[in-house]
Amino acid sequence: MGEAGVRAQHQDQADTVGGEEQGMRTQVAIIGAGPAGMFLAHLLHQQGIAAVVIERRDRAYVEGRVRAGVLEQVTVDLMRKLGLADRLEREGLVHGGTNLSLDGALFRIDMAALTGGSTVTVYGQQEVMRDLFDAAETRDLSILWNVDDVQLHDLDGDRPSVSWTERGVARRLDCEIVVGCDGFHGVCRASIPADVLQTFERVYPFGWLGILADVPPVDHELIYANHANGFALASMRSPTRSRYYIQCALDDDVGAWSDDRFWDELCVRLGPTLGERVTRGASFEKTIAPLRSFVAEPMRWGRLFLAGDAAHIVPPTGAKGMNLAVSDVTMLGEALAEFFIERSAAGIDGYSARALARVWKAERFSWWFTSITHRFPDMDGFSRRLQMAELDYIRTSPTAQKTLAENYVGLPLEAA
Ligand code: APR
Ligand code: PHB
């Protein structure tokens, strides 16, 4: 593959010549060092494709963000393939089942039995980011932190570039491909002309109030609870650290939720049997997050490719956010290897359609799982009874359970 040659040829980062700022050159410019950007950077590095990651914040900020913590098999597989799974193998909690509760009555979905052995692994996104960043240092991946004012240029030609400022100094990176991994609020999606870009959106009329606390989880598996007062989720980060959520109003004030009030409400929603088993303790993180479904199409325009939250958002019910970013960059990594190594554009030409096929199935699942587990403000008795009937159907039907299980553990990349 001539890796060293490719790198020398493409990553000649000529910096200052004669006192003037010069541009840098690489093959792939990756905007954003979240999960999408960092997984892609490692994938490209493994294949000898030169890349530079350009991130607006610093490592501590990106690593410190508390997000979901359930990894599908595609994510575990990618961490293994990239040689990043040592700690995951030691500390990750493998779950073969998950639980639903309707007004306190619990039932289990045996995901492993229903899917021929598939499982999910509980391992926080913060841990994933730490593993990605630690290995990036060891492997000497190029990451530029704290950059401002990123702008993309000439995306419709075959020599695009990225400009930004770093501590007030204007910089430029010439490349062949730009990948927008800059999340929902990034700049890349907006570089696609308005007459090309289509967006699809649902905003939900509630939020999730989430806490972390160093107390043992109420159960060894997750519990998704539908209660007349609203949704609750019992999750975890480790056998000694719990992550709990309750549905709240969008305009709710975190300050109005003391730890005692949170624990009381969580216990009501989990029902008396489980509620009694909850270990309470001081929370060290308490935030409200809105819920949104969003998809941008296409995920490619000219030499710009979108991956992860830059292209799509799911509500957290089902924990698909990071896993979708991983499936996008797995597909994009294959396509870019074809492009740079085999000099074939077939993969990059098919990327948007291939990625969107899987994205929309995860969108459907996350929307559906949200819709059967939450209280909607406009819900009348009819809608509530339909919701209860649907949960009861899942409880009693192995066929319905199988559908839930195969989506929850994550659809295979190829079936999408
Ligand atoms: N320039 C450079 N970097 C930017 C810019 C910009 N203009 N805008 C945003 N970024 C950076 C952010 O600071 C962030 O670190 O892009 C990164 C985007 O990361 P995420 O929002 O985590 O998006 P993604 O990598 O697609 O992750 C998808 O992980 O964080 C979760 O909720 C997210 O579950 C989703 C999944
Ligand atoms: C979490 O542990 O943060 C979590 C787990 C499952 C979800 C969402 C979030 O569906």
Image: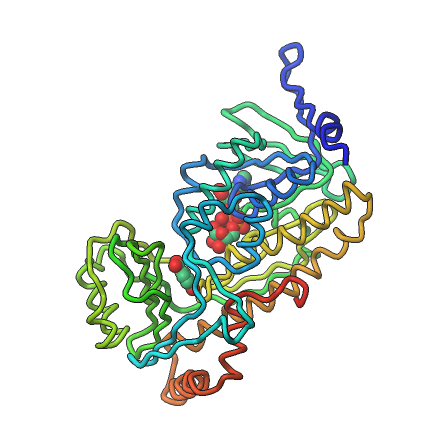
Give the left or right position of residue 183, taking residue 43 as reference.
left
Residue 282 location (% of width, % of height): 20, 53
Q: Quadrant of residue 331?
A: bottom right
Residue 51 location (% of width, % of height): 65, 35
Residue 268 location (% of width, % of height): 23, 73
Q: Quadrant of the N terminus?
A: top right
Depicted 303 relative to depicted 223: above or below: above
* Residue at horizontal 20 percent and vertical 56 percent from the top: 281
**In the rendered image, is residue 194 in sight?**
yes
Q: Viewer-proximal residue, 389 or 49?
A: 49
Q: In which quarter of the image is residue 259?
A: bottom left
Residue 109 location (% of width, % of height): 44, 76
* Residue at horizontal 73 percent and vertical 45 percent from the top: 337
Q: Tell me the quadrant of ligand 2.
A: bottom left
Q: Viewer-proximal residue, 327 or 48?
A: 48
Q: Viewer-proximal residue, 114 or 334?
A: 114
State the residue lying farthest toward the top: 18
Please, which colouring scheme is shown? rainbow
